[in-house]
Amino acid sequence: MDNMNEAQKSPAATGQSHKGDGLTVSGLYLLGYVTSNTARVFTRKDGSGRFVIVRHELALQPGTAVLEQFIDAATPAVQVRGDEVVTFPRMPEFKQVLLRVTQWKEVEKTLFIKQFEIIQVDGKAVA
């Protein structure tokens, strides 16, 4: 290991971000504008509890992307009253966001994103 050259020792070569900007890791990055935030509560088929699906819709050029988060209804990130979701994680509407996408699929020309990390909102890095 002592014979590694400087390029192999750099954080970028190991897949780690060395600037903290999140842009030095390879992958799929998505830039779009948040157009809506919605949430619905569902009961699990086995009756073991409830969960919330939070959807954020992004306008792309061209097309749209839907970010989906599956959150247990018992977590403090969401608040459910009856069959209505009162509070849930929201993205700032009509703001530009930059995401690093790790899991996605395309269905009828719509990009569905299952796992993502927010890098920037309105050009400002997110901690």
Image (spheres, rainbow, N blue to C red):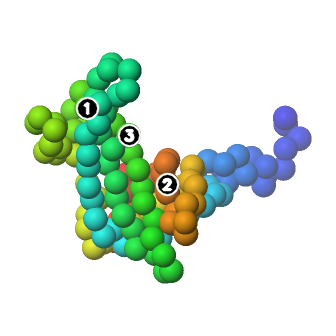
Residue at 39% x, 68% y is 58
Q: Secondary structure at mark 1?
A: loop
Residue at 70% x, 46% y is 14
Q: Could you say which is closer to the camera, residue 17 or residue 118?
A: 118
Q: Residues within 10 Å of mark 3 (few under 14, many from 20)?
A: few
Q: Position of residue 101 (x, y in %)?
A: 54, 55
Evaluate whether residue 100 shows in this view: no
- CA gap between label 3 and label 2 equals 12 Å
Question: Residue 118 appears in which quarter of the rendering?
Answer: bottom left
Mark 1 touches mark 2? (CB < 8 Å): no
Circle nearer the N terminus (1, 2): 1
Question: Residue 107 appears in which quarter of the rendering?
Answer: bottom right
Q: Could you say which is closer to the camera, residue 109 or residue 6?
A: 109
Q: Amino acid at mark 2?
A: Ile
Mark 3 touches mark 2? (CB < 8 Å): no
Q: Residues within 10 Å of mark 2 (few under 14, many from 20)?
A: some
- Residue at the left extreme, as displayed: 81
- Is residue 56 left or right of 75 when viewed as pictured? right
Read off the residue under disc 2.
113
Read off the residue under disc 3.
70
Q: Position of residue 69 (x, y in %)?
A: 38, 45
Residue at 26% x, 49% y is 39
Q: Secondary structure at mark 2?
A: strand
Q: Position of residue 93 (x, y in %)?
A: 25, 67
Q: Amino acid at mark 3?
A: Phe
